[in-house]
Image (cartoon, grey):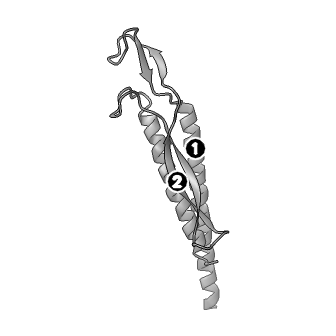
Amino acid sequence: MNSFDVLTISGSALEAQRRRMNVIASNLANAQSTRTEEGGPYKRQDVVFSSVALEANSAELKGVKVADIVTDGKPPRQVYDPGHPDADTEGFVQMPDINAMEEMVNMMMAFRAYEASVATYNAAKTMMLKSLELGRA
């Protein structure tokens, strides 16, 4: 095990959580979007993580990466708003099925995971610097 592997693993976690936060922010920003380029309301997205080996033949040291960003398959919410420009003939508008509370909880979890990765990175860096100081004495 290379002593810099922990920095590589922490870095991969930071990148993965950063992308997760971007997807969550996109979900929150589009919670009221009734039109998309594909047609219809915005559909919630979520990230899928996977582990990746640091080296080709290493079975124990693994980092993380975003394997895919998937679209939620839930149907849109029907909201009665006859004055809305996207309302159908009966006055219902199809809105994205995004729960702001659920997104905020996901954001807090991503933030905590990001924070833990930063702490790991800083602890490893401190240990490396201390080991260099041992050589001076």
Q: Can you tell which quarter of the image residue 81 is in?
A: top left
Residue at 45% across, 41% down: 25
Q: Is residue 97 visible?
A: yes
Assess disc 2: are there few (<14), some (14-19) or many (≥20) residues with their C-alpha within 10 Å of its C-alpha: few
Query: The C terminus lies in which quarter of the figure?
Result: bottom right
Q: Is residue 29 above or below residue 22?
A: above
Q: In the image, which disc is placed on residue 28? A: none
Residue 77: x and y in percent read 49, 22
Residue at 62% across, 89% down: 135
Residue, disc 2: 67
Task: State which tag comes first along the sequence, 1 or 2.
Answer: 2
Q: Can you tell which quarter of the image residue 7 is in?
A: bottom right
As rendered, which of 51 and 17 lies closer to the eye?
A: 51
Residue 3: x and y in percent read 61, 77
Q: Nearer the viewer, mark 1 or mark 2?
A: 2
Q: In the image, which disc is placed on residue 108? A: 1
Q: Residue furthest right?
A: 60
Residue 115: x and y in percent read 58, 55
In the drawing, does residue 8 fall left or right of residue 60? left
Residue at 43% across, 21% down: 94
Q: CA distance from mark 1 to mark 2?
A: 21 Å
As rendered, which of 107 and 97 lies closer to the eye?
A: 97
Q: Are marks 1 and 2 in contact (CB under 8 Å)?
A: no
Q: Is residue 101 above or below residue 55?
A: above
Q: Secondary structure at mark 1?
A: helix
Residue 104: x and y in percent read 55, 37
The amino acid type found where label 2 is placed reads: Ala
Q: Secondary structure at mark 2?
A: strand
Query: The N terminus lies in which quarter of the figure?
Result: bottom right
Assess disc 1: are there few (<14), some (14-19) or many (≥20) residues with their C-alpha within 10 Å of its C-alpha: few
Residue at 54% across, 43% down: 107
Q: Is residue 125 visible?
A: no
